[in-house]
Amino acid sequence: MVNSQDINILVIIPAKADSKRLIGKNKRVLAGFTLLEHAIKFSQKSSYVKEIIVTTEDNETAKIAQKYGVTVVGREQEFMGEREVADVYVKVFNELENNDSFTHVVGVQPDHPDRTVELDNLLEYAVNNKYDDLFTVNKDGSRNGSVRIIKAEHVRSENVSRRVGSVFDFCTNIHSEQDLLNAEENIKNR
């Protein structure tokens, strides 16, 4: 069993403004909240999360995050575009003072607002199974990136994956207007 004193979580929510497929995606409103707000609220429900950081280059996105009392870290141009999001986690984590207190880094993507598994359940599963790296998958088993949990020691050393586990979370990956409608319907039907 997991002892809450043994888990100290840093959540990093990457929220760039330049989505290629759906402009302004992270600021789109779905079931009364922006996609970014859904990610923040999902993270804030956890009893293990000690800090939440939103990383963005966009002032409007930063204001949304600050409304929820989370830390905002600017995102440099070289960490934009089609760059591997793990690079963002490593950079943000390693520039954070006193990062040695965290046991895990959790990446929460804003574009999966209708998650079906609570963060605490994911964290307990990762810790109980001693996973170095755990990520959510779609119904077909393909990685969806909704949530990724990585032991902090691997982020610190920039060695992000060793033993990888996965958890099914059938949520919508927002890429189109239809995806927004589908996710909103899923949220309303909970």
Image: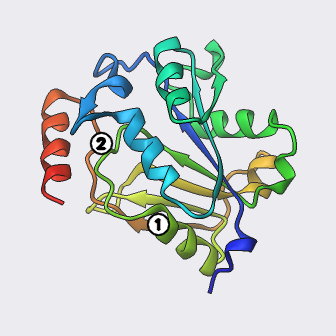
Residue found at x 42% / y 64%: 118
Residue found at x 43% / y 16%: 18
Residue found at x 56% / y 74%: 124
Number of numbered labels in the structure image: 2
Give the position of the N terminus as an image quadrant.
Answer: bottom right
Percent position of residue 32, x then y: 24, 35
Mark 1–mark 2 contact, CB under 8 Å?
no
Kind of residue at disc 1: Ser
Residue that label 1 marks = 166
Q: Camera-side residue: 83 or 38?
A: 38
Percent position of residue 162, x then y: 68, 62
Residue 81 in view: no
Mark 1 is surrounded, within 10 Å at the Cα level, by few (under 14), some (14 to 19) or many (20 or more) other residues, namely many
**Label 2 secondary element:** loop
In three-dimensional space, the C-alpha distance between marks 1 and 2, rounded to whole angstroms, equals 17 Å
- Side of 133 relative to 143 (left or right): right
Residue found at x 51% / y 51%: 44
* Above or below for 6 versus 88: below
**Label 1 secondary element:** strand
Kind of residue at disc 2: Asn
Residue 161 in view: yes
- In the rendered structure, which disc, 1 or 2, sits on the residue that comes first in sequence? 1
Percent position of residue 87, x then y: 66, 35
Residue that label 2 marks = 173
Q: Camera-side residue: 101 or 137?
A: 101
Query: Among all residues in the image, which is located at the extreme bottom?
Result: 1
